[in-house]
Amino acid sequence: MGARRNHTAKKTRKLDLYERLPVWFNQRFFGAAILVLVLGLPSGFAVWYLAQPDTLPIRSVKVEGEFRYLAQQDVYEALGGLASGGFFNVDVRAVKLAAESLPWVDSASVRRAWPDTLRLDITEQVPLAKWGEHQVVNVRGDLFQPPIKGLPENLPRFIGPAGSGQMVAVNYQLLSKRLAEINLRISEITLTDRRAWQLRLANGLYLSLGRTVNNERLERFTSVYPKLLGEKIARIDSIDLRYTNGFAVRWKESSAG
């Protein structure tokens, strides 16, 4: 009888000790953990394997887009070794940034094409005007600095305070569209430090618009120009459109009187 009680006490102490062990040692939990580990090994190895640069290596890089000023070779040279590596290992963001570092690249998108190709879709900058001696303004008014050589000879010139490129670009495009209706083209547009607008046309005529691009004033000029001023353009130096009910014509000195 006493031996039975002693055996029971020993069994109870063993159970108490088991219950005090950490939870991870629980038989069911421990078994589940082993199962997850075993099943996870293949997928973990696969992730590691695909991340290696010599796994499914990139063998072809294709640069696509409509180019007038940009040479494809310039893009390949800018990429250097960034476009090499494995299909899953190549740093797509680094490739994109390298392509967009070229002055004639407006934007670049990069995508993988199975099984070994990297495709770059390039959007080229569209030059709108020259800014200063070395910069160019695109159609959004952003400045970039490409090689000036090779630009169209009739590209207009923008002049304005720092940070005014977008404002000048917007007003240039509005004014150009209106003046083109009477066959006039802007060769230079200036926003002065006092925020006044001045135009120089391709025929040599100067226009002063004041501090606002006023459609009514411009309409007054475009309605009169073909009938009264067009044939006298060689004698006119400038036209001041800042008046409320008309405009002032300044004649060249040799044509005065």
Image: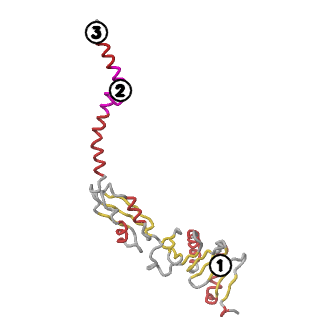
- For badge 3, the amino acid type reads Arg
Q: Residue at x 44, y 70 (%)?
A: 103
Occupied quadrant, residue 184: bottom right
The answer to the question of whether label 3 and label 1 lie on touching residues, with beta carbons closer than 8 A, is: no
Q: Is disc 1 surrounded by few (<14), some (14 to 19) or many (20+) residues within 10 Å?
A: some
Amino acid type of the residue tagged 2 in the rendering: Leu
The tag earlier along the polypeptide, 3 or 1, is 3
Q: CA distance from mark 3 to mark 1?
A: 116 Å
**Where residue 222 sits in the image (x, y, percent)?**
63, 78
Quarter occupied by residue 43: top left
Q: Residue furthest top?
A: 1
- Please tell me the numbered disc located at residue 208: 1
Q: Which residue is mark 2?
A: 21
Which numbered circle lies on residue 179? Answer: none
Whether tag 1 and tag 2 are in contact, CB under 8 A, the answer is no
Which amino acid type corresponds to the residue marked 1 in the rendered image?
Ser
Range of residues picked out in magenta: 15-32
